[in-house]
Amino acid sequence: MNTILAQNRKSCGRQTEISEVFVVEQADVLIIGAGAAGLFCAAQAGQLGLHVLLVDNGKKPGRKILMSGGGRCNFTNMYADHTAYLSHNPHFCKSALARYTQWDFIELVSRHGVAYHEKTLGQLFCDNSAEDIVDLLMKECEQGHVDLRMRSEVFSVERNEQGFLVKLSTGEVQAKSLVIASGGLSMPGLGATPFGYKIAEQFGINLLPTRAGLVPVTLHKPLLEVLQALSGVAVPVSVTAENGTCFKESLLFTHRGLSGPAILQISSYWQPGESITINLLPDLDLDAFLNAERAEHPNQSLKNTLARHLPKRLVESLQMLNKVPDVTLKQLTGPQQQQLAEVLQQWQIQPNGTEGYRTAEVTLGGVDTKALSSKTMESAQVPGLYFIGEVVDVTGWLGGYNFQWAWSSAWACAQALVHR
Ligand SMILES: Cc1cc2nc3c(=O)[nH]c(=O)nc-3n(C[C@H](O)[C@H](O)[C@H](O)COP(=O)(O)OP(=O)(O)OC[C@H]3O[C@@H](n4cnc5c(N)ncnc54)[C@H](O)[C@@H]3O)c2cc1C
């Protein structure tokens, strides 16, 4: 329903002509950001009977969903629980994750007939395409009669007695509730903007420092020059951050440094100046292996022996870095063998940075959870204002956890919107 706020009338004889009409559109809920969280919240709130307007400054809804999981969208994780999330308040995400779980989303995916499979470690991917998830969300929005408006810039947000007056490039909206679902800073090429943080600032809501997460790390020049030759080589490793957090997944050498799931995971726990410790042979008792090999093939080179468990090019690079001696097994001394174990199983590397928001999958930090209700995602200071998804200081591991947070936080918010 629209309200005509002002009319400029011109009288022409008996006829009255309306020359200019300022119309303020009314909505129960205005959601800003048609990404994972915004689309899901809009659909849920719409299906609960609310008139929802969902706006986004991009051309297409769910752009990150379409790019996610290599185009197949890792839409949730079977093992999702609060332990897979980073936040200054690790308890905050518990309630939402428990109320709308991975099993709820899996049920929705199944109900829409979207075929999926577990790739590894509980990570569920679409069999066909990430478009299946965007289609699912769009159908759910249709069911909720959501009014979706793309290419809509937000010029200003004001709080008033009826809720929020929002000036958009597509008109003015008066909404009872305002939901910020504009995501974080990662991948500006996919429409990321600091909008959500600016709104938080405008309303005096605390922000925690942001940084790129799930991101490749870069290396200092001398090490990079040697390891660049390995670009494209992947190895199963375990990687440990200085705070003791450890991930056992694969590492990929790149022309800029290190990537692959193990590195993306640890990047969220890495702080500038810190080292990471890489175990290149996480499943091998190196001493026992070398002793057994020495007993059988004493004249075998150490390089060829190690190449049974590691890519040969990696062993060669480690030799160039003077980390693997150029000796036969019978020449390998006790101290050398001990040092080798340290090099291969506790290889300390100090990244010189990350690739930053340009390639990061997520943004760590953001809207301080202390300022929000964990049940509803509503701001304690500004009733009617909600923050959901990645804009909030809750960041998941790689593996479908971030979408699950988007679904769970969106669902919790939608339930609360009905009771306003
Ligand atoms: C390449 C890539 C792959 C990923 N793969 C996975 C994966 O497989 N599994 C997983 O769990 N997570 C994955 N993620 C992370 C996941 O995409 C995000 O955590 C998730 O999309 C966050 O949802 P959101 O709705 O909070 O934000 P977004 O999905 O980023 O949506 C925010 C929306 O707000 C809009 N917006 C921003 N600023 C404004 C503004 N000023 N005005 C209007 N609209 C605005 C944007 O256009 C966007 O549509 C991936 C991320 C990337 C970048």
Image: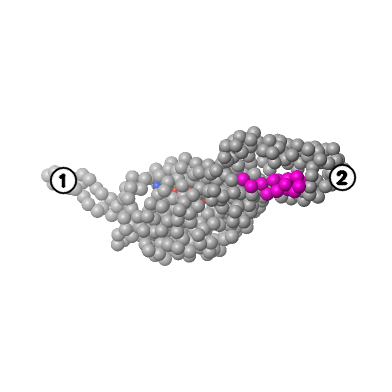
The one nearer the camera, 103 or 214, is 214
For residue 336: magenta? Answer: yes
**Is label 1 within 8 A of ligand 1 (CB to nearest ligand atom)?**
no
User: Quarter holding the N terminus?
Assistant: bottom left
> In the picture provided, is 8 more to the left or to the right than 374?
left
Identity, as a three-letter code, of the amino acid under mark 2: Ala
The one nearer the camera, 373 or 418, is 373
Which is closer to the viewer, label 2 or label 1? 2
Identity, as a three-letter code, of the amino acid under mark 1: Lys
Under circle 1, the secondary element is: strand
Per the image, the residue denoted by label 1 is 10
Question: In 3D space, how far apart are the residues under numbered discs 2 and 1 (Cα atoms)?
Answer: 103 Å
* Residues drawn in magenta: 335-349
The one nearer the camera, 2 or 338, is 338
For residue 389: magenta? Answer: no
> Which residue appears at 73% of the width and 45% of the height?
340
Q: Residue 238 at what x, y percent from top left?
A: 67, 50
User: Quarter holding the C terminus?
Assistant: bottom left
331 lies above or below 110 = above
